[in-house]
Amino acid sequence: MTTEEIILQAARKVFREKGLEGSRMQEIADEAGINKALLHYYFRSKDKLFMKIFSEAIQSMLPSVRISLQEVETLNQFLSFFVHEYLKLLNELPWLPRFILQEVNRNPKLIKDIMGNRELPINEIDRLIRRDTEKGLIMPISAEHLMVNVISMIIFPFAARPVIQTLIFKDDEHAYKQFLIDRSEQITQFVLRSISIQSKP
Amino acid sequence: MTTEEIILQAARKVFREKGLEGSRMQEIADEAGINKALLHYYFRSKDKLFMKIFSEAIQSMLPSVRISLQEVETLNQFLSFFVHEYLKLLNELPWLPRFILQEVNRNPKLIKDIMGNRELPINEIDRLIRRDTEKGLIMPISAEHLMVNVISMIIFPFAARPVIQTLIFKDDEHAYKQFLIDRSEQITQFVLRSISIQSKP
DNA sequence: AAATGGTTTAACCATATAGTTAAACTAATT
DNA sequence: AATTAGTTTAACTATATGGTTAAACCATTT
C-alpha cells in the first residue's frame, strides 16, 4: 500500500470519529505511523485532506438516492426498493449520517460545494403518486412529506444512535442490533400501510 | 440583568451555534461585552460553563417526552398529543436537535451524565397498543419501532435542516417554512393511517 | 560511484487558546 | 474617610496546534 493510501485510511478513521475540529493532524500522523510533516507533503493542509475524506463520504451516499425511478412500476415498488437499498448502505456505513450531519451543521456551505446540482427527483415521485392515486391504489399524499417521513425513519436511528439506544433500549446493545435488522421490513410495512387504500377483508 | 446572566446568554448563543469545540471563550466574552478573565471568575472553566448551557438544553427537551400517559384514553390520542406537543416545542427551539445531537455524538457520555435515569415509557405504550389491538381499533405493531418512527419524523427535519432544505426544497426558505407548519398534521395523519384498522367505506 | 529526484524526518515557527495573576475599581460598611 | 468584600481588567503563562524548513534518506539512472 502506498503512503498516500495509508494516510487516507488513517484520516478516514480519525475524521469520521472526531470530525474536522475534533481531529488533530498529529493524531492522524500517529494513526498512519508517520511524521506529521509528511501529511502536509501529501495533502497541503488539514482542510484539503478533510475535503478528500468528506467528498468520499458524500459520494457513497448518492447512488442509493438516485435510485432508478424508470425501472419501477408503482409507488409501492419504489418505496420498498428505496428503503431496502438505503438501509443496506447504512448498515455497511453506519457512521455516515453522523459524520455528514455533524460537518454540514458546522458549515452548511459543504452541501452545495459537494452535492452540487443533485436533488431528490420530487417531481417524478409526485407523478408516481398521482398515477397510483388515480388508479385508486393509494391515498393522495404530499410527495415532500412522504419522502421526508421515509428518509427520517431510515436515517435518524443512525444519526442519533447513542440517544435512541439509551432512551428506548436502556443501552441493550443486542436489542438495538436486532431492532436495526428488523428496520427495513418495519419501515416498509409502516409506510405502505399508511398510503395504501385497503380493500375490504 | 446580572453579569452572570449576561454571560449565560452570550454562552447560549455561541455554544448553540458552534458547539463546544467550535466556540472560543474570547468570542463568548466579546458577545457578553466583558473580559475573558471574567468568564473564568464566574464559571471556572470552559467545560463547566458549557455543561450549564447543555443541561438547560436537555432539560427543555424532557417535559414533552414525559407526556402524561395517564390522561389519555387511546393510543391515537396519545400519538396526536405527543406529535403536537413535541413539534410545538421544536418550533420554539429549532436549534435544539442539532445542538444535542452534535454534542452527544462528540461525547456519548453526556447522555447518561444528564438524562440520568429517564427513559421513554415503552412498557406503558406497549400496554396501550395491546389494549387497542384487542379492541380491534389498531393493527399490532412493535412499540419500539412505532416510537422511533414517530420521533424520527418529528426531529429529523430539524436535525438535518440544511440538507433537507437543499435536497428536497431547492433552498426555497418559504417552502420549507410552510412544510414545517404542515408537519404536525401530516405526521399525525401518516401515523394514524398506518396503525388504524380502516372500517369499510 | 556520482548525480538526480522523490520521500521522510527532526527541529522549528507563528499563532491561537484556555487558564492565571495581580492590580485596579466600585459600592457598601464602619 | 478608611476598610472591606466583591467585581473587573490588563497583562501574562503554558501549551497545543497547523504549518514550514532544511537536511537526511533511498532508490533509480547515468
Image (cartoon, coloured by chain):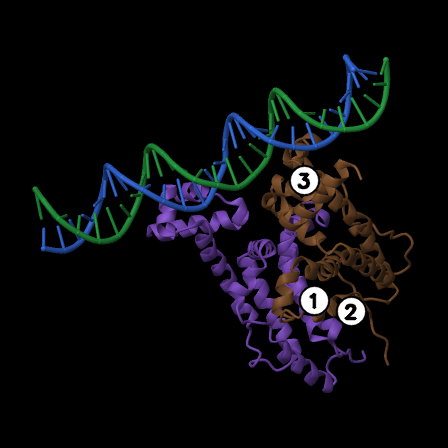
Chain colours: A brown, B purple, C blue, D green
Q: In this view, does B95 lie above or below B84?
A: above
- What residue do we see at 69% from left, 51% from top? B164
Q: Quadrant of residue A86?
A: bottom right
Crowding at mark 1 (Cα within 10 Å: few <14, some 14-19, many 20+): many
Residue designated by label 1 = B149
In the picture as drawn, the residue positioned furthest to the bottom comes out as: B135
Residue A199 x %, y %: 86, 76
Given contact means CB atoms under 8 Å apart, are the residues at marks 3 and 1 in contact?
no
Left or right of B147, for residue D29: right
Amino acid on which the number 3 mark rests in the picture:
Phe
Amino acid on which the number 2 mark rests in the picture:
Asp
CA distance for labels 2 and 3: 34 Å
The numbered mark 3 sits on a residue in which chain? A
Callout 1 secondary element = helix
CA distance for labels 3 and 1: 33 Å
Residue designated by label 3 = A50
Question: Which label sits in the foreground, 2 or 3?
Answer: 3
Residue A166 x %, y %: 61, 67
Left or right of B68, for residue A112: right
Question: Which label sits in the foreground, 1 or 2?
Answer: 2
Q: How many marks?
A: 3
* Viewer can see residue B165: no
Residue designated by label 2 = A182
**Quarter occupied by the C terminus of chain B:** bottom right
